[in-house]
Amino acid sequence: MDTAYTSSATAHDFADLIAPVSPQDFFASIAGKKPVHIPGSPEKFAFAMSWDLMNAILNQSAIWTPQTLQLVLDKVVLRPDLYAIDGVMRDGGRSQTVDFNKVRALIRQGASLVLNEIETLTPGMKRIAEILGATPGGKVQGNLYCSWQKRQAFDVHFDTHDVFAMQVTGDKVWRIYQRHFKDPINHPAFKTRDAAFHQANKGALLMEFTMRPGDLVYIPRGFYHEAMAESEATVHMSFSVVTMIGLDVVSMLFEYGVMDDAFRQSVPQPDERGGAALDEYLMRLAGRMREILRDPKVRSQLEGHLRNFTFQSHGIKLPDDSGKS
């Protein structure tokens, strides 16, 4: 088993994360278009995660719930009641907490450990999330996956967000298949597909490779993929990036429409002219939408939304922030 890495190195920008691929090449020919596997030096991501760091955050046992800590055994997400208990909080209220004795027993049976929404729990993961939130830009969530030799956590599937997966320790074999949906989104039309649909629509194998410590794989949303631990134990971080899409622009248009009488008018019923009144109405709406989207003030507001389309990560530094000497 690999030992925990210790390193003071960090990533300063997006170029550091994807090196030796340049950001220019990434955005010109890779981003949103195709997956890419980028080998790296073994300690490349040691600043963000290691066995020691993982154990340190796990042992903050009070923060874990069945939503943030999950167990997956042979492609099945285990029911929370198998490892969680109803506990009494210090204020007398009740809440589900994780029973780590049960977690330990299930891991010994081969269950993979999944830690969700941990992008702020180590300084290194927070730094990676900040970088991805700025470039390529978007809302970033960081998860961790710890698996064991020849055990597969999740069946073949596609994600509705772009994925940057970074191998921390151990080896894991990845297979990436063709894309079925172009740019799927977090909506039931895409999220409710079952395993039979995925198996039938994953298409031909595009890539198969082994992720080793320091490697990164980028997978645009919609590409089918699966992974299996090849070494005794493996850990990788996965950062999802959700970017602003056209539907977000439509939502912004709705707010303008509330204050625009063209959008508040009643929709006309089809008339004796064969629906000409309805056609004229739709043309007026289309023209008004075009005028709004060409308005420099709207363009400026949209640019502001793009800059702020990220999860806000607030922090505090004491005693400096106390204002006390």
Image: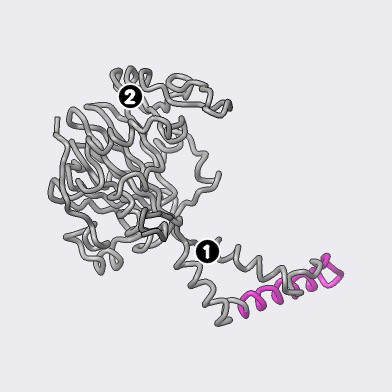
Q: What residue type is labelled 1?
A: Gly
Give the residue at mark 2.
111
Q: Residue at x 19, y 38 (%)?
A: 169
- Rendered location of residue 180, percent (x, y): 41, 48
142 versus 281 height, above or below: above
SS category of the residue bearing label 1: helix
Residue extending farthest front:
325
Q: Is residue 275 left or right of residue 318?
A: right
- Specify start and end residues of the magenta stretch as a single range: 268-291
In the image, 285 versus 99, the foreground residue is: 99
- Rendered location of residue 297, percent (x, y): 57, 80
148 versus 53 height, above or below: above
| Circles 1, 2 touching at the beta carbon (< 8 Å) | no
Quadrant of the snapshot with the N terminus: top left
Q: Which residue is drawn at 25% across and 66% down?
A: 23
Mark 1–mark 2 distance (CA, rounded to whole Å):
39 Å
Q: Residue at x 21, y 65 (%)?
A: 22
Quadrant of the snapshot with the C terminus: bottom left
The label shown at residue 105 is none
Magenta segment includes 279: yes
- Identify the image quadrant of residue 29: bottom left
Residue extending farthest right:
272
- Rendered location of residue 163, percent (x, y): 35, 50
- Identify the image quadrant of residue 307: bottom left
Q: Residue at x 66, y 78 (%)?
A: 287
Magenta segment includes 182: no
Q: How is the image coloured?
A: one colour
Q: In this view, does 257 lie to the left or right of 196?
A: right
Q: Crowdedness of circle 2 by 10 Å Cα count: few (<14), some, many (20+)?
A: many
Give the residue at mark 1.
246
Q: Which amino acid does label 2 sit on?
A: Ala
162 versus 272 height, above or below: above
